[in-house]
C-alpha cells in the first residue's frame, strides 16, 4: 500500500473498457516508471457492466501504485474525473481517456512543458484518428467555445492534460464540463499552454460519443460563459440587457407619444405600443432579477466562506524570512 504522497497522479475514467484495461495499465506503467518520479494511477470505474471492474481490481492487487475508485452507477465522464480529482494526492495531475486513443508516451512532453512555468498543459490532437462524423462537430464546437470563453485552444475535447494540483483543487465540475476545464480554470488566472499530441484509432470497445453529446456540450457552454464572465457579478449581465431592453422600449413609447400628441393619430390599436410596453416591463424584470441574483451570489460566498479571488503565492519579506530561519 502506497502511503507517501506521490509527485504525479494520473486520473483515468473508464466505462465498459474491459478490452483496453490491461494494455492501458501496461503502457502507463512503462511510461511512468521511466520518468523516475513517484506516481499513483487512479482508475475510476464509472458503472461498467462488461467486466472492467474485475480487471481493474486484478491490476490493483498486483500493483500498489494503482488505486481503483468504483462509482455506484454511471454518473458520466465529468463526475468520474471529479471523483478522481478529489482523491488525487500528487503535485501534478495527469488526465487521459481509457480507450487508448491518448498516447501515454506524450506524458513526459506534457510534464516538460509544465516545468517551463505553466499551470496547465493541454493536448491537441492535431491529426485525429476519428471518423468525419466526430471530427466535424468537434471542430465547430472548438471554434465556438474558444470564441465564447476567450480561451483560445485548438482542441477542447482532448482529455490528455497535465494540471498543477492547486488548480485541480479549485475546480468544481458539473454536467459535461470536464472539456471546459481550461475555460473554468481561466478564472483563476492560470498560465495555459497547448502542445500537439499523438492520437490513435480505437481498436477495442465502443465509443460513447454521439451527436446528442455535442448538443449537451453546447448547452453547458452557456453555463461556463456565465460562470466565467459573470459568476460573481450577475447584476452586470441582467442589468445590461435590462437597461438595453428598457431603453428601446422607452424610445418606442416616446415615438408613439409624439404620434399621439403632435400628429394627432390614434395609437391604441398599434402593435408597436404593446412591443414598447413589453420591452419596458421586461427590462425592469431583468434588472430586478439581476439584483436578486446578486443577493444570492453574495449570500453564497459569505455563508460558505467562498473567496472571490485566488492566491498564487504569498511573498515573505527578506527580514521576516531571516527571523523565521533563526528560530
Image (spheres, rainbow, N blue to C red):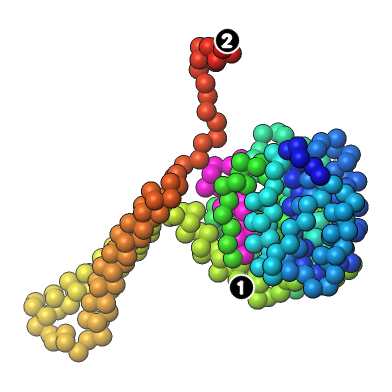
Along the line of sight, the residue nearer the viewer: 64 or 33:
64
Which region of the structure is painted magenta? 176-192
Q: Is residue 191 magenta?
A: yes
From the viewer's perspective, is 148 left or right of 76? left
Where residue 294 sits in the image (x, y, percent)?
A: 34, 56
Q: State which quadrant residue 286 falls in.
A: bottom left
Say which quadrant the C terminus sits in: top right
From the viewer's perspective, is 21 left or right of 229? right
Where residue 324 sits in the image (x, y, percent)?
A: 55, 15
Q: Which residue is mark 1?
A: 215
- For the point 38% across and 48% down, the residue is 302
Along the line of sight, the residue nearer the viewer: 43 or 205:
43
Residue that sits furthest to the bottom in the current view: 269
Q: On screen, 267 above or below 234?
A: below
- For the point 44% across and 55% down, the residue is 231
Say which quadrant the N terminus sits in: top right
Along the line of sight, the residue nearer the viewer: 272 or 182:
182
Rendered image: mark on residue 326: 2
Q: State which quadrant residue 111 falls in.
A: top right
Q: Of the residues under marks 2 and 1, which one precedes in the sequence?
A: 1
Secondary structure of the residue carrying tag 1 is: helix
Mark 1 crowdedness (10 Å alpha carbons): few <14, some 14-19, many ≥20 = few
Mark 2 crowdedness (10 Å alpha carbons): few <14, some 14-19, many ≥20 = few
- For the point 73% across and 65% down, the residue is 46
Amino acid at each position: 500500500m502506497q502511503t507517501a504522497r506521490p509527485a504525479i497522479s494520473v486520473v483515468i475514467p473508464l466505462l465498459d473498457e474491459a478490452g483496453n484495461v490491461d494494455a492501458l495499465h501496461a503502457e502507463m506503467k512503462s511510461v511512468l516508471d521511466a520518468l523516475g518520479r513517484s506516481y499513483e494511477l487512479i482508475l475510476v470505474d464509472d458503472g461498467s457492466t462488461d467486466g472492467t471492474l474485475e480487471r481493474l481490481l486484478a491490476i490493483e492487487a498486483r500493483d500498489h501504485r494503482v488505486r481503483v475508485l468504483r462509482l455506484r452507477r454511471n454518473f458520466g465522464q465529468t463526475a468520474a474525473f471529479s471523483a478522481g480529482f478529489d482523491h488525487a494526492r500528487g503535485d501534478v495531475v495527469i488526465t487521459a481517456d481509457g480507450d487508448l486513443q491518448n498516447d501515454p508516451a506524450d506524458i513526459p512532453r506534457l510534464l516538460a512543458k509544465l516545468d517551463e512555468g505553466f499551470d496547465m498543459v493541454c493536448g491537441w490532437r492535431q491529426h485525429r484518428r476519428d471518423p468525419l462524423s466526430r471530427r466535424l462537430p468537434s471542430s465547430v464546437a472548438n471554434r465556438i467555445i474558444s470564441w465564447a470563453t476567450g480561451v483560445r485552444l485548438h482542441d477542447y475535447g482532448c482529455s490528455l492534460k497535465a494540471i498543477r494540483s492547486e488548480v485541480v483543487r479549485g475546480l468544481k465540475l458539473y454536467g459535461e464540463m470536464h472539456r471546459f476545464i481550461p475555460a473554468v480554470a481561466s478564472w483563476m488566472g492560470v498560465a495555459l499552454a497547448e502542445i500537439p499530441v499523438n492520437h490513435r484509432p480505437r481498436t477495442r470497445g465502443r465509443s460513447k460519443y454521439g451527436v446528442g453529446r455535442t448538443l449537451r456540450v453546447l448547452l453547458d457552454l452557456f453555463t461556463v460563459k456565465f460562470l466565467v464572465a459573470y459568476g460573481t457579478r450577475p447584476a452586470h449581465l441582467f442589468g445590461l440587457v435590462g437597461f438595453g431592453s428598457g431603453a428601446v422600449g422607452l424610445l418606442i413609447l416616446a415615438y408613439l407619444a409624439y404620434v399621439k400628441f403632435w400628429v394627432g393619430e390614434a395609437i391604441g390599436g398599434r402593435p408597436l405600443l404593446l412591443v414598447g410596453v413589453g420591452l419596458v416591463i421586461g427590462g425592469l424584470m431583468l434588472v430586478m432579477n439581476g439584483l436578486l441574483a446578486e443577493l444570492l451570489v453574495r449570500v453564497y460566498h459569505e455563508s460558505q466562506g467562498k473567496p472571490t479571488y485566488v492566491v498564487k503565492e504569498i511573498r515573505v519579506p527578506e527580514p521576516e524570512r531571516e527571523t523565521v530561519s533563526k528560530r
